[in-house]
Amino acid sequence: MQIRGRALYNLLRLTEVDRRNVKKWQIENYRQLSDEDIFDRLSNLKIFIDYESFPHFARSVDTPEELLEYLVSTEYSQPQAEQIYLLLFELWRRHLKGRESLSILCDELDHLMEQYDNGHGEVAEDLYSDLYQLVDIIDESVNEEQSANEVLEYISSYLAHDLESFLYDFIGHLIENQEESAASELIEGYEDYVTNKQELEFLKLKLIFASDAVETDGMMALFSDELVEEGNVDLACDFLDFILKEGEIFTFFTLFPKVLSLVANKLQYAKLIKIASGYLDTLDSKHEHRLLLHELIEKKSAEFPM
């Protein structure tokens, strides 16, 4: 997938790359620069703008990317143009509130995602707001010529983070923190657009279970069948872990043998055994559940000698 906007530079900064092949300006945190520093650097690159002229130039275009094309001639080298872009982008982000382009919104999302992943839970409200704003953009963009998947892929190209993976984790945390309303709104907003429908269905089950466990009985059985039919072992393991922690023992023992039969590699086998072991440790040595699990695991172990 093509990477657009500022996402490439965010990705370089967030990932473990060989820094010998990366220039300092490519991974620098431009949010820490003063306006004066930015204008001075632009001046050194032969872009002569200031506080007064910047809004004037920006009125002629709709995005920081268009502003770069407007101000930069073909005489500039690619590295020079990229440096100018990053500086103009930061000025736009700071001083043109209310004129957020898709690249600006996605950069802010990347920034908030990074903070959230680093333990700054206080940004959760802003994250929710931006993620929900993105739903509106997707809604407005989907039409006969652009499918939901195409729109989501295009928007994701402006992000350094994996939007879907982060979304699933974030909604899961909202549910754990009893923020059911926010979790429900994000599930409803994205359910027609994400590619991993089962992951979102799992979150929906968790959400309903948190408010009415009885209501999920039939849904859990149906979801178990879907996981097995699709052969989704990794998600099935997560589901088994969840229902075991919630005390849904019958559903666990109905699903466990089916998932075990689908295990195709050592990593999946080890993950499933770890889940089962947590339950086995709570049982008496002659408990019928313990004996049954041991028998199932013993039969499968021959395929994956440790």
Image (tube, rainbow, N blue to C red):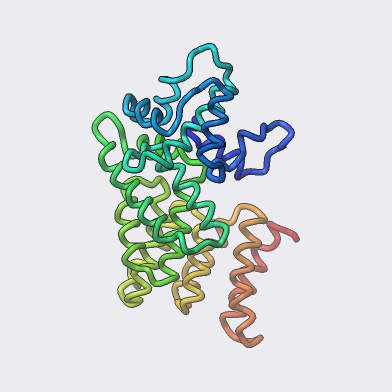
- At 52% from the left edge and 67% from the top edge, which residue is drawn? 256
Question: Is 144 positioned to the left or the right of 194 in the image?
Answer: left
> Where's residue 222, x and y in %?
36, 63
- At 67% from the left edge and 68% from the top edge, which residue is drawn? 298
Q: Is residue 208 above or below residue 60?
A: below
> Where's residue 183, x and y in %?
36, 62
Q: 275 or 2, which lies in front?
A: 2
Q: Is residue 130 above or below residue 123?
A: above
> Where's residue 302, x and y in %?
70, 60
Question: Is 174 positioned to the left or the right of 214 in the image?
Answer: right
Q: 204 or 283, which lies in front?
A: 204
Query: Residue 182 appears in which quarter of the rendering?
Result: bottom left
Q: 302 or 192, which lies in front?
A: 192
Quadrant into which the C terminus falls: bottom right
- At 48% from the left edge and 58% from the top edge, which residue is drawn? 169
- At 59% from the left edge and 77% from the top edge, which residue is drawn? 279
Q: Report how many numbered discs are placed on residues in the image.
A: 0
Q: 135 or 291, which lies in front?
A: 135
> Where's residue 124, x and y in %?
43, 60
Query: Residue 295 appears in which quarter of the rendering?
Result: bottom right
Question: Is 128 positioned to the left or the right of 79 in the image?
Answer: left
